[in-house]
Amino acid sequence: MSDLHIRPADAGDLPEIVAMLADDPLGATRESPDDLTPYLRALERLADDPNQYQVVAERDGRVVGTLQLTVIAGISRRGATRSVIEGVRVHADERGSGLGTRLIQWAIDESGRQGCQLVQLTSDATRTDAQRFYERLGFTASHVGFKMSLEGGS
Amino acid sequence: MSDLHIRPADAGDLPEIVAMLADDPLGATRESPDDLTPYLRALERLADDPNQYQVVAERDGRVVGTLQLTVIAGISRRGATRSVIEGVRVHADERGSGLGTRLIQWAIDESGRQGCQLVQLTSDATRTDAQRFYERLGFTASHVGFKMSLEGGS
């Protein structure tokens, strides 16, 4: 396979990013690939935030993967900075190619460059393959992840 | 009990915040209450970040609780903004007083004011009481939380 390039996402990548988010049993019900407006607004907000890294993996001019890395300063653990990985997606054509590993390794390396002492992420409990994947990469499934949807959010 | 006031933390609160972080089976091994320097640096960094809310709960002039709320924009879920709650601590004297509920309710309300569609947090799998607490408040334990410590972080 040809070389993979991981770079910051721009507005031109949004159709491919959103298509990957929607091409997923959970994402299919919560994305709207036909209307990119809310995604564009979100990407602009991320671009303005020095703690946010929305990246894509590109191969042969095609966007084939994405993730969001957020750097979060904090008081606990002696003022430790941590990073949070969200929205990891690999194009269906690329599954099994090692691209997921490359993306997560990029996020771990970037977290180190940003002075983080901890990298964390949550994975839906139904995604058992993803959980094995993160454990193989050296993550520990030490926590329970809680979520609450808010009504009336804008 | 007298009134409780939830407000942004300042440097003068750090001794009480760090004492609460350290007064905990997990925190005891990873905090350094005798040296506040790294905590002060972290608090300054949080104060400079408009997406960060480090708050304390004060009763009768005493700091009796704390948490960190981070607002995170994102692409997935139609450009949803989420918040993450970290470092929730209630002083030993105040446990069972409803203060934990008040703090989390503040974080949920503030998340709504900040336009978040989702509030999330992780709880160490050994903290089974905390997990029941979050479920009672309406959170769903839908995810597995993974962490990785980085060596050489600054």
Image: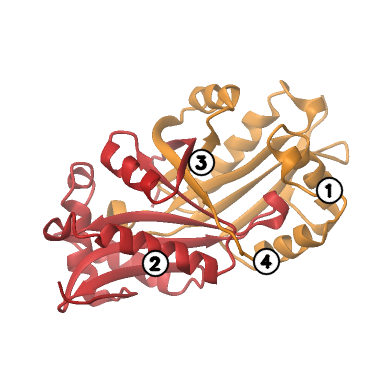
Chain colours: A orange, B red
Foreground tag (1 vs 4): 1
Name the quadrant of the C terminus of chain A. bottom right
Visible in this render: residue B148?
A: no
Q: Which residue is mark 3?
A: A121
Separation (CA) of disc 1 from disc 4: 19 Å
Residue A15 to residue B13: above or below: above
Q: Residues within 10 Å of mark 1 (few under 14, many from 20)?
A: some
Question: In which chain is the residue bearing label 2?
Answer: B
Q: Quadrant of the N terminus of chain A?
A: top right
C-alpha separation, residue under disc 3 versus residue under disc 1: 25 Å
Question: Nearer the N terminus, badge 1 or badge 4?
Answer: 1
Mark 3 in CB contact with mark 2 (< 8 angstroms): no
| Residue A33 - label | 1
Q: Which residue is mark 2?
A: B106
At numbered mark 4, what does the secondary structure look like: helix, strand or loop? helix
**Nearer the viewer's eye, disc 2 or disc 4?**
2
Amino acid carrying mark 3 in the image:
Leu
Front residue of B48 and A30: A30
Q: Label 4 is placed on what type of residue?
A: Arg
Q: Residue at x 81, y 52 (%)?
A: A14
- Residue occupied by mark 4: A45
In the foreground, B76 or A70: B76
User: What separation in Å lies between label 2 and label 4 (alpha carbons)?
Assistant: 24 Å
Q: CA distance from mark 3 to mark 2?
A: 24 Å
